[in-house]
């Protein structure tokens, strides 16, 4: 089945940047109420740059791998770039398989293209992103209203 | 004039006792149109999620449709013929559903689901606290319905949220204390301190007949005996037992029993509450409005007798008519045989899972101790991922916490996968499920037998 790409399995078994680290500017805790999966995520900002994302993710392969890819793709990038990556991930995930994703923009995130065909799993892939955008706001980052309005709803 | 529905599936030919024969199951399957469809790349559907909701036989679907086509009108009002017919259909359905669980006709209340049925009881307790709410009620019964600080409400750790949250809320509203019976590692109720937990302060003991996750059949007699000894009322969540076991309210000797229609081949949108008539007679209403009144003046209202007192607004008429036919359908198979078939499937299921050391079954390991469902976890693989691999093979199971979060915490898992069966499932389908399950360690590279 095309859902479980090797990249997803690798990220879920060896999540990158995992663990909760200090210092941090904001911490969020989001829960997927259908299965009880949860992610605690910390963000540290350095000006308009995402200096660090650390996390503790308990969940299925999709949600853990998605958190890992998120950390890989946003650490060291500006908030605007991170939000661009989020936008591209979300567009791909909600495209019902029409948008294969741009590797330039979302890196290993393209491995999640198959998730879009399974509506029940899209929430798994977006859980950490909602925790991340929430943490950015709490950390005082300026996020364009366009992005904020599209943030997937908090499920905690 | 009312419509008579033919709801005789397996019974079309002489039935024998014991588990259903393959030919009988085939005939039953033929009655369920949905079971003929394919899923995911034309794979035959193996539906093992009846614990969440069962599929519906054509006779049930036809009953609902024919009600709308032939008899649809507002019940309990109107002088025209259709209104009479609709009322007749509705009350006939009530009689039929009552008979299915050994109840009297006036003792059955139709709700929109089992959750509402349980809330109806919980709110009767809190509403009983208002001035004059129990006016005219038998003083002995009234005393049992009054609840407040110092009183205790007892549930169990294995409850579905529907039979937990309403009692937490009742405790919060009234100042009573919520207590619970714990679960053992084997997934049974820990009755070692039953006498301490259910005591003279206990006003209500609410528990599941069958766990929706573990499948455990709980010792109703023991619990009821203890509740009676201390004068506590018992509320039985029978959602997972009524579709699978012969259930008789007099035999169980509980005070209230709630179940849903959609898990027993009936339609969505209907639940049932049975209550002892003397209790229902004293209970204040939960939802108020039209249809549940006796007289209404601007200054105040008096209520109708049960069951109408608890059926405010337009009732679930078409759903009740269809549910009555689902009762006919199940009785035509015979609940003893439904149970025997169920146990046979669980034996195959449990034996197959036992052969796979990378699978851990939650709850009792003997089919005789459980009903309907088997929840399990696969070493190193999240239930969502297990469910996805099964789905790829056309096998539908439930994954998640199954609305029983505390139970999962107690069993030390975040969530689980659950396969649940019904009369239309076959041993061959269980084998398809087991083979599909074997793909899980392959896909995720987790060692078999690890």
Image (tube, coloured by chain):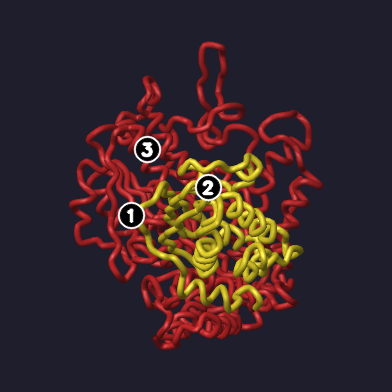
Mark 3 or mark 1, earlier in chain = 1
* Res. A48 mark: 2
Depth check: give the residue in front, B119 or B83: B119
Labels 2 and 1 within one chain: no
x and y, in percent, of residue B233 in the image: 33, 44
Residue at the spot x=61%, y=29% of the render? B291
Q: Chain of mark 3?
A: B
Q: Which chain is red?
A: B
Crowdedness near tag 2: few (<14), some (14–19) or many (≥20) residues, C-alpha within 10 Å: some
x and y, in percent, of residue A96 in the image: 72, 62
Residue A107: quarter of image: bottom right
Q: Is residue B85 toward the left or the right of residue B402 in the image?
A: right
Q: Which chain is yellow?
A: A
CB under 8 Å between discs 3 and 1: no
Quadrant in which the C terminus of chain B is drawn: bottom left
Depth check: give the residue in front, B66 or B34: B34
Residue at the spot x=63%, y=45% of the render? A147
* Res. B283 mark: none
Q: Is residue B190 toward the left or the right of residue B383 in the image?
A: left
Depth check: give the residue in front, B319 or B38: B38
* Res. B170 mark: 3
Crowdedness near tag 1: few (<14), some (14–19) or many (≥20) residues, C-alpha within 10 Å: many
Residue B59: quarter of image: bottom right
x and y, in percent, of residue B119 in the image: 46, 41
Q: Which residue is mark 1?
A: B156
Q: Chain of mark 1?
A: B
SS of the residue under disc 1? strand
CB under 8 Å between discs 2 and 1: no
Q: Do we see residue B104 in this rendering?
A: no
């Amino acid at each position: 089945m095309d859902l479980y790409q090797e990249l997803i399995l690798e990220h879920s078994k060896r999540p990158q940047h995992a663990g909760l680290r200090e210092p941090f500017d904001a911490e969020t805790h989001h829960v997927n109420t259908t299965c009880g999966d949860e992610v605690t995520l910390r963000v540290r900002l350095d000006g308009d740059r995402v200096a660090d994302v650390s996390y503790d993710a308990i969940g299925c392969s999709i949600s853990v791998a998605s958190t890992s890819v998120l950390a890989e793709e946003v650490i060291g990038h500006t908030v605007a770039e991170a939000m661009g990556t989020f936008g591209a991930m979300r567009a791909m995930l909600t495209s019902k398989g029409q948008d294969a994703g741009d590797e330039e923009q979302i890196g290993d995130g393209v491995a999640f293209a198959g998730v879009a065909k399974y509506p029940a799993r899209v929430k798994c892939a977006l859980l950490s992103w909602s925790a991340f955008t929430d943490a950015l706001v709490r950390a005082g980052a300026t996020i364009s209203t366009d992005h904020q309005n599209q943030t997937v709803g908090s499920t905690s | 004039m009312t419509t008579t529905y033919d709801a005789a599936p397996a019974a079309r030919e002489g039935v024998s006792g014991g588990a259903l024969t393959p030919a009988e199951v085939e005939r039953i399957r033929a009655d369920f149109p949905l079971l003929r469809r394919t899923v995911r790349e034309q794979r035959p559907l193996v539906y093992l999620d009846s614990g969440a909701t069962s599929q519906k036989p054509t006779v049930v679907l036809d009953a609902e449709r024919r009600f709308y086509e032939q008899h649809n009108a507002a019940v309990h009002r109107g002088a025209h013929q259709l209104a009479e017919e609709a009322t007749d259909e509705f009350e006939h359905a009530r009689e039929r559903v009552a008979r299915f669980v050994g109840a009297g006709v006036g003792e059955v209340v139709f709700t929109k689901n089992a959750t509402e049925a349980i809330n109806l009881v919980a709110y009767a307790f809190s509403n009983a606290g208002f001035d004059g709410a129990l006016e005219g009620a038998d003083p002995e019964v009234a005393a049992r319905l009054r609840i407040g600080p110092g009183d205790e409400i007892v549930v169990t750790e294995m409850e579905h949220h529907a039979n937990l949250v309403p009692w937490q809320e009742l405790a919060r509203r009234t100042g009573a204390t919520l207590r619970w019976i714990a679960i053992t590692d084997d997934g049974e109720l820990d009755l070692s301190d039953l006498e301490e937990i259910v005591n003279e302060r206990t006003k209500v003991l609410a528990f599941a007949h069958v766990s929706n996750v573990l499948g455990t059949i709980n010792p109703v007699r023991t619990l009821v005996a203890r509740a009676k000894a201390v004068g506590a009322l018992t509320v039985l969540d029978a959602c997972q037992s009524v579709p699978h076991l012969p259930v008789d309210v007099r035999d169980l000797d509980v005070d209230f029993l709630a179940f849903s229609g959609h898990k027993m081949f009936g339609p969505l949108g209907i639940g049932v509450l049975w209550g002892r008539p003397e209790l229902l007679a004293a209970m204040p209403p939960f939802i108020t409005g039209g249809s549940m009144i006796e007289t209404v003046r601007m200054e105040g209202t008096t209520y109708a007798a049960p069951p109408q007192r608890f059926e405010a607004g337009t009732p679930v008429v078409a759903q009740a008519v269809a549910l009555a036919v689902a009762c006919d359908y199940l009785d035509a198979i015979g609940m003893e045989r439904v149970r025997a078939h169920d146990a046979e499937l669980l034996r195959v299921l449990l034996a197959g899972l036992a052969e796979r050391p990378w699978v851990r079954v939650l709850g009792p390991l003997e089919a005789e101790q459980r009903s309907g469902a088997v929840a399990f976890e696969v070493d190193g693989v999240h239930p969502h991922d297990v469910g996805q691999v099964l789905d790829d093979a056309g096998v539908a199971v439930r994954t998640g916490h199954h609305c029983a979060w505390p139970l999962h915490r107690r069993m030390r898992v975040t969530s689980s996968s659950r396969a649940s069966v019904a009369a239309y499932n076959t041993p061959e389908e269980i084998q398809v499920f087991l083979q599909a399950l074997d793909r899980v360690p392959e896909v995720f590279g987790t060692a078999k037998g690890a």
